[in-house]
Amino acid sequence: MSAPAAPLTGRVPARRSLSVRPDPVALLALPAFAYLAAAYGWPLLVLLGRSLSGPQGISLTPLAQFLSDPFSWRVIGNTVRTALLVTLVCLLAGYPAAVALARARGAVQGLLLLSVILPLSVGVVVKAYAWQIVLRRDGVVSGLLVGLGIWDAPQRLLFTETGLVIGAANVFLPFMILPIYAVIRQIDPRLAEAAATLGASPLRRFLGVTLPLTLPGIVSGIAFVFSLAVSMYVVPSLVIGDRFQTLATLTGRAFLFMRDEQLGSTTAVLLLAVAVAVVVGSTALARRLGGGGQS
Amino acid sequence: MPAPTPSAPTPPASAPSDPGFLTIVGAEKRFGASTVLGGVDLAVAGGEFVSLLGPSGCGKTTLLRIVAGLVAADRGRVVLDGRDVTRTPPHRRDVGVVFQNYALFPHLTVAENVAFGLKAKGHPRAEIPAVVARFLDLVQMAPFADRRAQALSGGQQQRVAVARALAVRPKLLLLDEPFSALDRKLREAMQIDLKRLLRELGITALFVTHDQDEALTMSDRIAVMNRGAIEQLADPVTLYRRPATAFALGFVGLSSRLHGTVREEGDGVLRVETALGTVRAPGRFRPGSPVLLGVRPERIRIGADGPNAIEATLVEVAFQGARAHLFFAGPDGERALLAEAPEIPAGARPGARLRLSWAIEDTLVFPAEPAQRDAA
């Protein structure tokens, strides 16, 4: 009940009107909401309108045209595939890192946390250029793999999809580690101990206790990384180049080089649809999983 | 927890007669520079209920965790049912633990919590629901089988934690202050329930607590721990009547404590000079030795004469329903002496001088230690 409001007006509001009355605390979100509405929501509506308008007013023709082109499907495939691969790499690399981060104590933990957060302050362009150097034919990775005898001859990973996934995973890894770390930190270490005393092997403890309890963190990590990776523009532009188009790079090309606002709007809206689906889906999933887990 | 039914599980395969069913030899543990356990020996018989009683930081929980295999001792051995388990990981020890915060799995229902250990130990799948139902029944939690663990009250969670630990038929049950989060009435009821359940199942239990009443109520024997060592291991009556050390006296039960100096010794009776007068006590100390004397409050008679009689000033009367506590001033005016009486005696007003007496054999004598805890 909004206690301060009722006594001031001198009459007790009806129960119905109470439920409609906005929570005063929610008003704190107003500035951010207003900014987003003006700077993001309005342009988005314009974009959406353009993607759905042909020469004869509102029509789905541009969208249908785009989707009838096999090239478009290749672009959509590129986009979703790389985003999924990047998310998978981040999850596999990020989960153990999050566990280590949560288990570490004192100075070690501070150092680990710093090494997760500090890279966020390095610009994406800088990182992408760094990966260009690392992934070249005469780069560190190639030299190392040849030196270890895994590769027979130097190869370049630059301008390949593998190189793109490696580079992008590096950029987005913190967004996987941090939400999982936040959840693991909340888990009572006694739960794993209790499982051990009940006869559960380390693997069973992980699968039966730790993993289910960290699922909400995993889901939000996946949502973060996937929505970042599906819309990444700088990394593919610099690491793989124009031969490999994603919805994001195609949107950029359409507006910047081809001056095809129709195409750009269509790809942008498609991208948005994918991202919204992932965020809404994962939020719902996290809520369902979280209902039984942390509270 | 109800009386045993015909379906009650059979006791685990322990030998109730084995006096060293659980044997801890020279358990030592250091964390950094501080010694938490300094070479502890303890033997628990099969079916016995032993409490580790001591203040926080005395090492009792560390000892429990060493027995569970959750902490590795720096030195020493743990033998359980004839098997050296010192290096055995916790999931192969057959030692159940009820944690202080119960540590129920929040993502599972009550029944799934109890089933967890059975599944982990490879119990035949078809039999699991029946075993779960039986143990939930034993702790009267059957109606809550499908609830989430977090939707339960503290007392209910504690019952589920007990059922979960017992369902896998551990050889030994460890309990780490399982009642500390419950209010007093519930705690007392559950202590009696749990004690009965464990006795009926024939479970050997090691119980960690800092609550002396809890230890006295539940234990067959109590190990009083202080600074990483066991000061005394005895049954509750002996521990209360004949504490072995000044620490055990102070930690278990209330007592009046007086410092004094031995004046003479003869026939095993000491004459000790204290600030409140001469007190006689059984024991053998060289004249001139500084000693600490203790008397249990219910041993002191008010207004009566006897071989040990002193006069003291009443400072406070605390009425407690079934009995009254009377505090008397010590040499420095502090509340040093405590007498217990069934009724508040006539004329017992603060400031009154009253005569206190007790039997010689009721005076407990300890060598004075440099740093003594305060009385009562």
Image (cartoon, coloured by chain):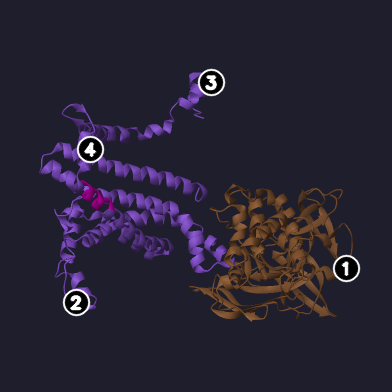
Using the image as rendered, state which of residue A235 and residue B329 is in the foreground.
A235
- Residue flagged by tag 1: what amino acid is it? Pro
**Residue B256 seen from this side:** no
Tell me, yes or no, whether dots 2 and 1 are on the same chain: no
Q: Nearer the viewer, mark 3 or mark 2?
A: 2
- Circles 2 and 1 in contact, beta carbons < 8 Å: no
Where is residue B161? Give x, y as percent. Answer: 63, 58
First in sequence: mark 3 vs mark 4 = 3
- Circles 4 and 2 in contact, beta carbons < 8 Å: no
Quadrant housing residue A143: bottom left
* Residue picked out by circle 4: A63
* Residue picked out by circle 2: A152
For disc 2, the neighbor class at 10 Å (few under 14, some 14 to 19, many from 20) is: few
How far apart, in angstroms, are the residues tagged by discs 2 and 1? 101 Å
First in sequence: mark 4 vs mark 2 = 4
Q: In this picture, which residue range is highlighted in magenta? A: A72-80
Chain ID, mark 2: A
- Image position of A258 with respect to B186: above or below: above
Secondary element type, mark 1: loop
